[in-house]
Image (cartoon, helix red, strand yellow):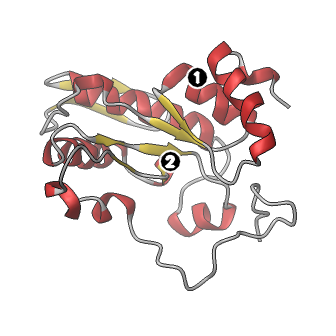
Amino acid sequence: MSRYPYSADGRIAVPANADWLDPLLALSLPRQSPGRIELATGVLLLPEHNPVVVAIQAATLDVLSVGRFSPGIGAGWSAEEFAALGVPFAGRGRRTDEYLTAMRILWGDDPASFIGEFSRFDAIRAAPKPLHGARLPVLIGGNSNIALRRAATLAEGWYGFNVPVTDIPERITALVSRDPVHVT
């Protein structure tokens, strides 16, 4: 069984009977929420999904929420989960980066084409387009140095989980400096 990376004992802090709702489906309900409530996933494991489908779902949520949606994505940590889906665990970071690139192309181009290591499509139309266009604000989840680098270079924000309060200043400094590779 994979070791959970965000706890000292390697066990996940969430009980087995917790409601693990699909993040994209769960957010489709509160579209008429009052005020200016922002919506985000925390986090959707992007390499476990088809980037064309996720791009359309995220754009739909952005439109339904009148521009208040930010997809929070992560690369994942459970090898067993990837195996159950038939997705290779190795290379999940590269797959995450590539899928995000493909999604931004789908959000911005019409028709959209992309050729990558893990995904390819040619002259497809993906609708709707996010209200933010290709720069729909993406949050990167994870506490590793690689996740911080991904947040600083490919996204508009970071979703840290279970980060000790004492570690937050170091993480923020790393993100602001855009050089999180040196974070310990």
What residue is rendered at 58% in x and 22% in y?
A: 152
Query: Which one is in front in this view, the residue at disc 2 or the one at disc 1?
Result: 1
What residue is rendered at 15% in x and 41% in y?
A: 66
Q: Quadrant of the C terminus?
A: top right
Instruction: Check disc 2 and report the residue beneath it.
Output: 47
Seen as rendered, the residue at the extreme bottom is 17
What residue is rendered at 38% in x and 60% in y?
A: 23
The residue lying toward the viewer, choosing from 25 and 55, is 25
Instruction: Determine the image quadrant of residue 132.
Output: top left
Tell me: residue 54, above or below residue 115. below
Q: Is residue 88 left or right of residue 129?
A: right
**x and y percentages locating residue 46 in the rendered image:** 47, 47
Instruction: Check disc 1 and report the residue beneath it.
Output: 152
The residue lying toward the viewer, choosing from 87 and 26, is 26
Give yes or no for contact between labels 2 and 1 (Cβ–Cβ under 8 Å): no
Mark 2 and mark 1 lie on one chain; the one further toward the N terminus is 2
Q: For marks 2 and 1, give the CA distance.
A: 19 Å
Q: Give the crowd class for mark 1: few <14, some 14-19, many >=20 residues within 10 Å.
A: many
The residue lying toward the viewer, choosing from 36 and 118, is 36
Label 2 amino acid? Pro
Tell me: residue 158, above or below residue 32. above
**x and y percentages locating residue 38 in the rendered image:** 31, 45
Q: Is residue 20 left or right of residue 50?
A: right
